[in-house]
Image (cartoon, grey):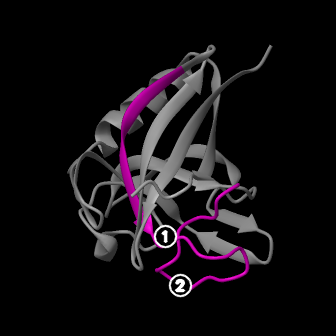
Amino acid sequence: MEKTLWILIERYSYTVHTSLGKMSFLYDDTKQFFGNTLEDAVRPGNVKIYGETALPGGLECNVSLFENPKFGKTIIFHTEADRATIKFGPLTWVGCLAHGGNNADDTLGCVLVATTVIDKDHVQGSLKDQLRTFIEAKIKEGYTIKARFVNLDQLK
């Protein structure tokens, strides 16, 4: 029986430049909160502005381990066999990682994962290393890692 761990990103606050959310893990019939997320602005399903558009709500994709000199060890979201590309409807993203950062200048289509929300446009306290360590351990335990992006109603 295949074991799947879902990284669930639930966005709840939206501005012109950013989307705030919460990252949780779904596995073994449990939901475990992990941290806060900051992404680019959510847009309609047929609109993408390079470097300024969050991954679409409703997206389900694969997650793999990733490493490069700029971001070090992290994870990457993808739908395609190249393990770098996301295709959703007519739109494409390439190289969407989970990493640290503080504001929209740091996102470029990626998911910032952090301990603290400062305000609707800023987070701090990178959780990139803890995320990578947790995902590596779950892969070693035999889990397949997937991600789901959900746009909740704006709360405030």
Return the x and y of residue 72 as percentages of the image width and height: 33, 52
The N terminus lies in which quarter of the figure? Answer: top right
Label 1 neighbourhood size at 10 Å, few (<14), some (14-19), many (20+)?
Answer: many
Residue that badge 1 annotates: 109
Return the x and y of residue 122 as percentages of the image width and height: 24, 63
- Judged left or right of residue 79, residue 151 is left
Residues shaded magenta: 31-58
Q: Amino acid at mark 2?
A: Tyr
Which residue is at a point 73% across and 80% down the rendered structure image? 46
Which residue is at a point 61% across and 61% down the rendered structure image? 84
Up-down: is 102 above or below 26? below
Return the x and y of residue 80 as percentages of the image width and height: 74, 58
Residue 50 — which label?
A: 2
Is residue 139 in view from this perspective? no
The C terminus lies in which quarter of the figure? Answer: bottom left
Q: Amino acid at mark 1?
A: Gly
Compare residues 43 and 73 and report the one nearer the observer. 43
Compare residues 12 and 88 and report the one nearer the observer. 12
- Judged left or right of residue 51, residue 94 is right
Q: Secondary structure at mark 2?
A: loop
Residue 139 image-quadrant placement: top right
Which residue is at a point 44% across and 54% down the rendered structure image? 155
Q: Secondary structure at mark 1?
A: loop
| Magenta stretch encompasses residue 79 | no
- Judged left or right of residue 78, residue 19 is left
Q: Earlier in the sequence, mark 2 or mark 1?
A: 2
Up-down: is 54 above or below 97? below
Pointers 2 and 1 in contact (CB under 8 A)?
Answer: yes
